[in-house]
Image: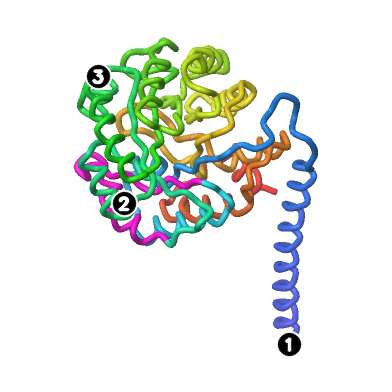
Amino acid sequence: MSIRLALKDQAMRLGVWKWINNCHRQQTYLKRCLSSSEPASGLPEYVKIVEVGPRDGLQNIKKFVPTDVKIELIHRLANTGLPVVEITSFVSPKWVPQMADNAEVLRGVNKNPNVSYPVLTPNLKGFNAAIEAGAEEIAIFGAVSETFTKKNVNSTIKDSLESFYVVCEEAKKRNIKIRGYISCVLGCPYEGKIEPSAVAYVASKLISMGCYEISLGDTIGVGTPGSMAAMLREVKKVVPVTKLAVHCHDTYGQALANILTAIQMGVSVVDSSVAGLGGCPYAKGASGNVATEDVVYMLNGLNVKTGVDLDSVIEAGKYITDFIGTRPESKVSRAIAKL
């Protein structure tokens, strides 16, 4: 072997070893940071994470994500240990073009029996289309702001609740599980501050319709631990805390603090989006959802079980952001990439 080839071979070997050592350092660092013991005092032993990336995360992405890429993302997320992956929305493609392939996505997913795959249905037309495509769980979504409701579903709060009632009745006839979303619980882009009593009112209505769980959404990410606590105190008066979830956007960097406040108050279900993807087409200025990677990392550090493999979620986030052509918004993903 020539000297040049020998040097090239040695360089390649060193490069491989550098990569191996780098991976080893990353895993050693994570294990050291996330050593297991009892959960911190006052926290639940287990938190269910609802992954909303394939729906809420992608809906605001301008570049159309092909059906096969969406399905691959869903499969990757379902293999991380996540118990729930919300996969699409049966809305008009005129308003949300990214979800135009909703039926193809739902039919194309190879479902893991240990994972739930809810879909969003804004009205009876969307519900019927979802059922025809094979949906086994749906989500309905309302808001506590009249202006936001008008822009989001072209309706008043009262009329939207009546529409949801019809959907829920049909779902119950078919033994379809129903999850309820409430948007703008800590602030509205059009009306500003939201009174906690308004959130409690809508939450009580959705529970009475048959929703098994209510996800409380800080749609524009303006909430703080103080406003989160005040809102939850009011909602807990009319809905058992075991039926509540939180859905936080990270516009002002408060999402993890708000989630910690919520779980300290008994909430044990958290919505999040892989790589921090997201936004809302009807909420100007809203940033992405809190990143699943960051939520898992925090809960691991608190020794709260999630059943989710952090490394696998990071890889899933890299897969979709590489396709879209962006960096993950997850601070954990970015930090690990630098190790």
Q: Earlier in the sequence, mark 3 or mark 2?
A: 2
Please tell me whether mark 1 sits on a helix, a strand or a loop.
loop
The answer to whether marks 3 and 2 mark residues whose Cβ atoms lie closer than 8 Å is no
Q: Is residue 330 above or below residue 196?
A: below
Q: Identity of the amino acid at label 3?
A: Lys
Label 3 and label 2: CA atoms lie apart by 34 Å
Q: Position of residue 197 (x, y in %)?
A: 42, 10
* Segment colored magenta: 84-109
Q: For this view, does 227 lie left or right of residue 132? A: right
Say which quadrant the N terminus sits in. Answer: bottom right
Q: Residue at x 58, y 24 (%)?
A: 262
Check disc 3: other Cα within 10 Å, few if <14, some if 14-19, many if 20+.
Answer: few
Q: For this view, does 35 lie left or right of residue 53? A: right
Label 3 and label 1: CA atoms lie apart by 81 Å
Label 2 and label 1: CA atoms lie apart by 51 Å
**Coloring basis for residues:** rainbow
Q: Is residue 137 above or below residue 1?
A: above
Q: Residue at x 38, y 31 (%)?
A: 210
Please tell me whether mark 2 sits on a helix, a strand or a loop.
loop
Q: Which mark is residue 35?
A: none
For mark 2, what is the residue?
64
Q: Residue at x 63, y 51 (%)?
A: 309
Q: Quadrant of residue 162?
A: top left
For mark 1, what is the residue?
2
Q: Identity of the amino acid at label 1?
A: Ser
For mark 3, what is the residue?
158
Q: For this view, does 9 lie left or right of residue 58? A: right
Q: Is residue 248 magenta?
A: no
Q: Residue furthest front?
A: 173
